[in-house]
Image: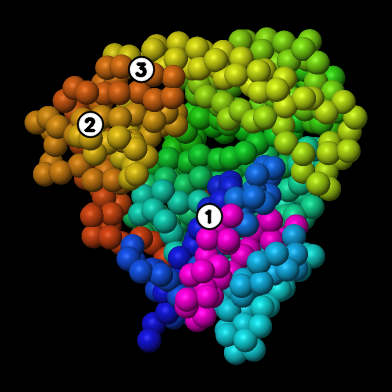
C-alpha cells in the first residue's frame, strides 16, 4: 500500500522552501500527500529555533502525538530543521516515540532514514556539521501553482549576537547564477508567474565566486525570462546593500518595487551590541536612495524590542527611525534569549514587563504609519496576483485576496463585466482600492480587468509544479528553454 505523509512547517521562508524539497523526495520515494481525513503514515516536523517558544511549540505537538503513536505503532514521526540541528539526540530522549531526527545539512536523507528506522525498529538520528548536498539539487513538490521560492544561497557569514541561524545553517554557500536561472526557467515553464529569490543575506550573494555585484546582475538576468511577471527577494542586509541593486530593481521591469530591509534597532549603541555593521544614518540613506529611484516602493522591516542593555533612550531612537522610515509594514519581536548566542549571556537583560510595554508602543506607532501610508493608495488602480488562502475572512465576505506588485495584501470583490467566467488563484486582475486598513487594502468595486492564466488553470485543476533537482544549469524536467543572455556579465 502507498504510504501517506504530512509536513508541518514552522519558521521562515527558507523552511517553507525546505519543506517543498522534503515533499518532493517523499513523493519520489513512493509516498503520497495525506488527505484531510485520518492519520498520515508519516508526520514530518520542519522546525525553527529562532524564537524562545520554538522548543515549547515542538514538544507540545510531539506530546499530542504520543497517544496517536501508541494506538498506531506503524506511524512514523520525523523531526528536522533548525531545532533538530540544535537539540540533536535530546529530541528522542525527551520524546522517545520520535523515529527520525535530521538536521539542516542533510534534508536529502529523510526517505533513507525513515526506511532505516522502520527496518531497524529504532530511532535514527543523523545530524551533519556541513552541507551534504545543496538543497536545490533535490526534487521539490511546490506549494503553489503561481508563485515559487528559488534559493540562491544557504547559510550566513554574519555574527549577529542575537541570532542562532549561522550556527545551525553554517557559512554562506552560493549557487552558480546559471543554476538559479535554470530553476527559475523551469518554474516558469510550469506556469509559475512569480518567483522569490531566497537567502539569509541575498546581497552578499557571489561571495564564494568573487563577484561583488553578482546579486544585481542576477536580478537583471531575470528580466528577459519570458513569462516571468514578478521577481521578489528576501532578505538583504543593510551593511552590504549596494546602489547597483537599487539600479537593477528600478531598471528591470519584472522586479517588484518591494524591499524588506531589517532594521532591528534604531539605536547605534544597540546596533553595535548586536554586531550589526551599519548605523541608523546608513540605514535611512538606503531608504532615501530606494525611494528616489522608485517612488512607489513599499518598504518593510524587522525590529527587535528589548535587546539586552536597551534603555528608554535607545528605544526612543528606534521610534525616531520608524517615524522617518515610514515603513509600509514591520515584523516586530520581543527579544528572547537563544542559548548559544552571545546576547543570551549579556548583562542588563531587560525585564519582560518593560519589553512588553515598549513593544506595544512600537506596534501602535507602526500601525498608525502603515494606516496613513495605505490611505494614500485609496482610489488607485492596483494589479493583483490572485492568491489562495491569504484572506481569512474571504468566505464570509465573498471576497478574494491578491498581492499587489509592491507586496500589499488587497481583498477584492471578484465581479464586473470584465470577469471571464470565474476568477481563480493564479489569475491576474486590476482593481481600484476603496478602503485602507493598517495591514491590508480593500477593493470593493467592479474589477477593471481580469486575465486568465495558465497558473490559474493549474490551480483550478489542482496541479502544482514538481521540479526535479536543478544542477549544472539544467532544469530538472522537460526540454530546457534557451537561456537568456546574462546582463552585466552575470556568470553562468
Question: x%, y% of residue 209?
Answer: 75, 53
Residue 8 against residue 422 in the figure, above or below: below
| Mark 1 or 3: the one toward you | 1
| Mark 3 or 2: the one toward you | 2
Q: Is label 2 in a helix, a strand or a loop?
A: helix
Q: Is label 1 in a helix, a strand or a loop?
A: strand
Q: Which residue is mark 2?
A: 397
Q: Cα distance, mark 2 to mark 1? A: 28 Å
Q: Residue at x 61, y 65 (%)?
A: 79
Q: Which residue is mark 1?
A: 9
**Residue 110 in view in this figure:** yes
Question: x%, y% of residue 259?
Answer: 56, 30
Q: Cα distance, mark 1 to mark 3? A: 31 Å
Q: Are marks 3 and 2 in contact (CB under 8 Å)?
A: no
Q: Is label 3 in a helix, a strand or a loop?
A: strand
Residue 275 against residue 445 in the figure, above or below: below
**Residue 19 in view in this figure:** no
User: Does the magenta-highlighted stretch encompass residue 252?
Assistant: no
Q: Residue at x 12, y 30 (%)?
A: 416
Q: Which mark is residue 370?
A: none
Q: Cα distance, mark 3 to mark 2? A: 16 Å
Q: Residue at x 39, y 19 (%)?
A: 437
Using the rendered view, name the quadrant where residue 432 is placed: top left
In front: 486, or 151? 151
Q: Which residue is mark 3?
A: 436
Quick one: label 2 or label 1, which is nearer the N terminus?
1
In front: 126, or 429? 126
Q: Report the span colored magenta.
A: 60-86
Quick one: label 3 or label 2, which is nearer the N terminus?
2
Amino acid at each position: 500500500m502507498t504510504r501517506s505523509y504530512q509536513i508541518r512547517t514552522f519558521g521562515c521562508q527558507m523552511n517553507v522552501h525546505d519543506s517543498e524539497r522534503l515533499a518532493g523526495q517523499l513523493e519520489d520515494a513512493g509516498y503520497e500527500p495525506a488527505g484531510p481525513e485520518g492519520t498520515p503514515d508519516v508526520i514530518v516536523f520542519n522546525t525553527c529555533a529562532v524564537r524562545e517558544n520554538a522548543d515549547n511549540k515542538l514538544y507540545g505537538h510531539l506530546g499530542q502525538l504520543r497517544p496517536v503513536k501508541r494506538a498506531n505503532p506503524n506511524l512514523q514521526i520525523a523531526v528536522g530543521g533548525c531545532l533538530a540541528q540544535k537539540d540533536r539526540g535530546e529530541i528522542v530522549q525527551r520524546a522517545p516515540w520520535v523515529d527520525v531526527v535530521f538536521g539542516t545539512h542533510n534534508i536529502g536523507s529523510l526517505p533513507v532514514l525513515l526506511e532505516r528506522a522502520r527496518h531497524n525498529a529504532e530511532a535514527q538520528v543523523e545530524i551533519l556539521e556541513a552541507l551534504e548536498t545543496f538543497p536545490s539539487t533535490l526534487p521539490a513538490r511546490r506549494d503553489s501553482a503561481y508563485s515559487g521560492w528559488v534559493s540562491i544561497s544557504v547559510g550566513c557569514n554574519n555574527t549577529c549576537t542575537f541570532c542562532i541561524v549561522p550556527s545551525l545553517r553554517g557559512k554562506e554557500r552560493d549557487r552558480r547564477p546559471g543554476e538559479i536561472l535554470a530553476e527559475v526557467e523551469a518554474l516558469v515553464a510550469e506556469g509559475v508567474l512569480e518567483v522569490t529569490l531566497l537567502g539569509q543575506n541575498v546581497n552578499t550573494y557571489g561571495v564564494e565566486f568573487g563577484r561583488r555585484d553578482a546579486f544585481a546582475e542576477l536580478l537583471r538576468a531575470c528580466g528577459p525570462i519570458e513569462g516571468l511577471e514578478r521577481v521578489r527577494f528576501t532578505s538583504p542586509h543593510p551593511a552590504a546593500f549596494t546602489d547597483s541593486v537599487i539600479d537593477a530593481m528600478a531598471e528591470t521591469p519584472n522586479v517588484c518595487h518591494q524591499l524588506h530591509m531589517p532594521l532591528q534597532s534604531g539605536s547605534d549603541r544597540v546596533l553595535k551590541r548586536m554586531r550589526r555593521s551599519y548605523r541608523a544614518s546608513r540605514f535611512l540613506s538606503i531608504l532615501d536612495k530606494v525611494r528616489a529611484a522608485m517612488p512607489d516602493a513599499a518598504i518593510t522591516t524587522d525590529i527587535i524590542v528589548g535587546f539586552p542593555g536597551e534603555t528608554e533612550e535607545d528605544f526612543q531612537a528606534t521610534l525616531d527611525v520608524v517615524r522617518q522610515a515610514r515603513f509600509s509594514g514591520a515584523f516586530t519581536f520581543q527579544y528572547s534569549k537563544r542559548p548559544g548566542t552571545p546576547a543570551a549571556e549579556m548583562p542588563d537583560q531587560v525585564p519582560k514587563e518593560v519589553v512588553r510595554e515598549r513593544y506595544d508602543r512600537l506596534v501602535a506607532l507602526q500601525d498608525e504609519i502603515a494606516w496613513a501610508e495605505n490611505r494614500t493608495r485609496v482610489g488607485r488602480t492596483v494589479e493583483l496576483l490572485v492568491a489562495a488562502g491569504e484572506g481569512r475572512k474571504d468566505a464570509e465576505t465573498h471576497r478574494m485576496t491578491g498581492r499587489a506588485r509592491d507586496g500589499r495584501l488587497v481583498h477584492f470583490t471578484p465581479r464586473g463585466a470584465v470577469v471571464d467566467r470565474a476568477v481563480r488563484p493564479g489569475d491576474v486582475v486590476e482593481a481600484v482600492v476603496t478602503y485602507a486598513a493598517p495591514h491590508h487594502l480593500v477593493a470593493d468595486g467592479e474589477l477593471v480587468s481580469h486575465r486568465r492564466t495558465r497558473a490559474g488553470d493549474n490551480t483550478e485543476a489542482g496541479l502544482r509544479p514538481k521540479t526535479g533537482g536543478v544542477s549544472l544549469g539544467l532544469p530538472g524536467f522537460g526540454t530546457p528553454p534557451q537561456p537568456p543572455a546574462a546582463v552585466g556579465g552575470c556568470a553562468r
